[in-house]
Amino acid sequence: MAPRDRVQREVAELLHYFDVVLIHHDHNERGKVDALREQLANDAPRIVGLVPVRETEAWMLADTTALRAASPANDTTWEVPHDVEKVTDPKALLKAVLGGRQDVERLFDRLGQTAGLDMLAKVSAYRRWLTELRTAMERLHFL
């Protein structure tokens, strides 16, 4: 079975059990969320896409306070661009900011938990996802 068919089957199955299904795709797979909505047209409003401009890891760069707290010795010699979604390789920048440690993936998890939502609100892809999620929740009368 082709991966795309497997994903469609799994999403259809999840829609039997959950009110909303979140689908994450990287920027180069943007059309996959729309294709799923087309294939599952009756449930399309319950499918919420989480599609970053490049990579979701860039979102962790939005909260420089959390980054500084996670950085070895609170090193502040690195610079994060104002628009974190324009960072070409956010994983590489995060690894550099976090001291190039081999276990940097664990620090990604910690940053994901400590990044402030008010800081994430500056990221356009995050705002798009939040709006889409809110719309789905409103349609279902949860909000």
Image (spheres, grey):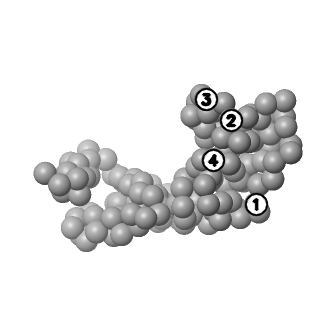
Write the residue at 22% across / 65% down. 40
- For the point 25% across and 71% down, which residue is it? 38
In front: 92, or 114? 92
Is 137 placed left or right of 110 in the picture? left
Q: Earlier in the sequence, mark 2 or mark 4?
A: 4
**Label of residue 44 in the image:** none
According to the picture, the residue beneath numbered tag 3 turns out to be: 102
What is the C-alpha distance between the residues marked 2 and 1?
19 Å
Residue topped by disc 2: 100
Distance CA(mark 3)–CA(mark 1): 24 Å
Task: Please rate how many residues cluster around mark 2, counting C-alpha atoms within 10 Å: few if below 14, some from 14 to 19, many from 20.
Answer: some
Q: Residue pushed farthest left?
A: 1
Badge 4 amino acid: Ala
Query: Which mark is nearer the camera, 3 or 1?
Result: 3
Q: Which callout, 3 or 4, points at the residue further toward the start of the chain?
A: 4
Q: Does 71 sit above or below residue 134?
A: above
